[in-house]
Amino acid sequence: MTNRATGPPAASAPSERPPRSRAGRRRSGVVELTLRRLALLPAQLLFILVLLYVTVNVPLAIHAGHSSTIPGYFRAFAVFVANMFTGQWGIATLGPYDIPWSTLFADFLPNSIQIALFALPLCALIAYPVSLAVGWSRRSSADAPVRFGTLVVALIPSFVLGTWILYAVFFGFYTTFHDLPGDGIIPSPPWFDQYYGGFPSWVVDGWVTRPTGLPVIDAALHRDWTVETITIVKTAIQASAVALAYLAIFLRHGRSIVASAKQELYVTGSRARGVPERTLLWRHTARRVTPSFLLVFALTIPGYLGAQFVVEGLFSDPGIGFITLSVLSQADYVPFEALVFVLAAFVVVAVLVIDLAAARLDPRGRFAR
Amino acid sequence: MTSFPVRPRSAAENGRRRVGWRAQWARRPPGAELWIGASLALVYVGAALSALVVYWGSWGTIATNPAWVPPFHPIGPSWAHPFGVVSGLGADVFRAVWQATPWDLAIVLAILAIDATLALSFGVVAGLSEGGWADALITFVSDSIGAIPSFFLVVAVYAGLTLLDPSQGNLPLFIALFGLLLWPTGARTVRERARVVAHEPYVEAARASGAGTAHLAYWHVLPNSVSPVLAQLPVDVAPIFFVLAVFPWFYNCGGGYLVPSTLGPDYFIPHLAPASPLPSVAFPEWGNLLAIGTCAGFSFPGGADYWWMYLFPLLAIVGLGLTISLLCDGIDQWRRLSV
């Protein structure tokens, strides 16, 4: 209640007065949100570890016949948390590899990053204009095909999509590079075997390239243009499979965001003032929906990872996805707990960063209101 | 202070007559989407019921023929085998897909029922108590669970819990876990909707006339927050089949060296992956059939594409997803028009 004589009590206190400028209000909103989210971060990670411990470690202990007391379980949980954070995840039992899991993850990570570096820009290049064009379309006849088309593609598991793409481009690839698939569909070590009768000096253990770990960069640094071409073609095929699977997830959201942005009053006002449709769409609305697109990406990171992991598995590519599917298929417990933990931490941090970027990019000043 | 009645008067007490679904139907008949969806659903239910009768007593195992196992004499679609034969497993695809219909309908509908119930309940509670401890708790849990890819979490938790009951294939546990871990996305969207509904004038009016939180949640906010769940359900079908298909596929042919065949490199014999929710590799389930069909149907580098081995299970999956989508969209449109 506002008292006419004294004024609103909250606003009169100098310490609680909100910053006067629009930029100041916006900044304080972002800082408050960031601090709240940062405070929740350890709690979220701990929650995930508790979930894993209760559903995996405790049944494992009971199954192995280790009866323990409640304090014993708490002590074991403390050790489990410490091991997760310090990277003590045991020795790998994946195929022929006999090194610590943490080393194997670190060795396999660059290949996953390489695919993501190809796939994410490809996704953005297609998803951004297509979502805008489809969401803006006035024809309702365009709506149903997009809605059902994206649903159909989303329902086809990504290994089937990937196999189709691989199949469509495989024979051209095979004829050009005379690659002989051995134990996977196109595993990377046989390429080196094929061309060198063994591994070049900059490939360690058959899968880690030196010095950077990213095959695209390392092959260029060593001026090995055959391996460079093969790597680029292979990664482009993988990226297109990932992009196809992920776009089906993204476009459903992207289209509805643009459709609702189209209804906003400023669009009607600008149109009434004679602003051309093209400017309204590609300048005004494109900027307006960017933060929302980023937020949708943040929420669908798990879906994206699923698509990329399967494509890595399909190509027997030495990446994190390949390890993930291998350990899950073999019901190998300790590494998949570590993988769940690392991935969850990555997603939580990525969502936070994307939220902040979205707040920064929003032309309407979301936190000013 | 004036005391208000705890329970607001019902529509009948107020002298109004509740409009039944017959009257609504007469006033606004359902649109084409709902009709097509319902027809397709009838086809699926008919196929499931007839399969239960035809395969009485052998519901859980596909009949296989050892003569069809080798991949070198692929049997394509014919009058004897309308959908062809999947080599490796050595099964008639038409009979296998038909036999799998009741299982898959049960799996998908049970998971979606748990998912929808939890998403609606938690979403409405969080939306109504915006800023309160219930909202904070539900948002925290849904954000934490939502940070992990659902396929990943379900398989990890299932593999752990199934150790307590090591008998191979615990489908009810798998269904319960999937439903319990799939709700966060739906709950988030329901919460956003419920927040808006909670400030609508009719809710304020009900609150002012003495309605309790439970009454508001059940009679006002819940019925008006169903749309986000109906939009989310068709999307949630994809991860179910993804999990059911991707692990048998990867275990059998994705990793290459995981299951070496003793009969030779071109001899594909499917195996059941460890911690699989299915009791055997010959269990009638579309995801399992799709995985085996993809492994057996593509031959690298020979270039053979035995499309019938994977196409028909895939069509069954996509058809079910589309049916659920048409039904949900149709129901949502009809509800809006009726209101």
Image: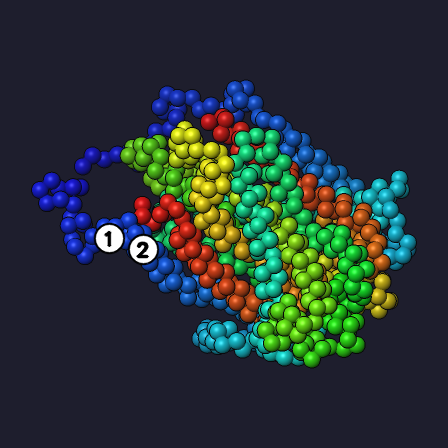
Of residues B110 and A238, the one drawn nearer to the viewer in this rendering = A238
Q: Looking at the rendered structure, which numbered label has been put on residue B24?
A: none
Residue displayed at 72% across by 46% down = B314
Spot occupied by residue B202 in the image (x, y as percentages of width and height) = 35, 31
In this picture, is B259 found above or below A243?
below
User: Which three-letter amino acid code belongs to the residue tagged 2?
Assistant: Arg
Please name the residue that numbered disc 1 is placed on. A19
Q: Is residue B23 visible to the viewer in this orientation of the structure? A: yes
Spot occupied by residue A314 in the image (x, y as percentages of width and height) = 70, 60
Residue displayed at 71% across by 35% down = B43
Q: Is residue A101 left or right of residue B259?
A: left
Instruction: Please give the chain letter of the residue carrying mark 2.
Output: A
Q: Looking at the rendered structure, which numbered label has been put on residue A27?
A: 2
Q: How many residues crowd mark 1 within 10 Å: few (<14), some (14–19), many (20+)?
A: few
Q: Is residue A266 left or right of residue A180?
A: left
N-terminal of the pair, mark 2 or mark 1, is: 1
Whether labels 2 and 1 belong to a single chain: the reply is: yes
The number of numbered discs placed on residues in the rendered structure image is 2
User: Which three-letter amino acid code belongs to the residue tagged 1?
Assistant: Pro
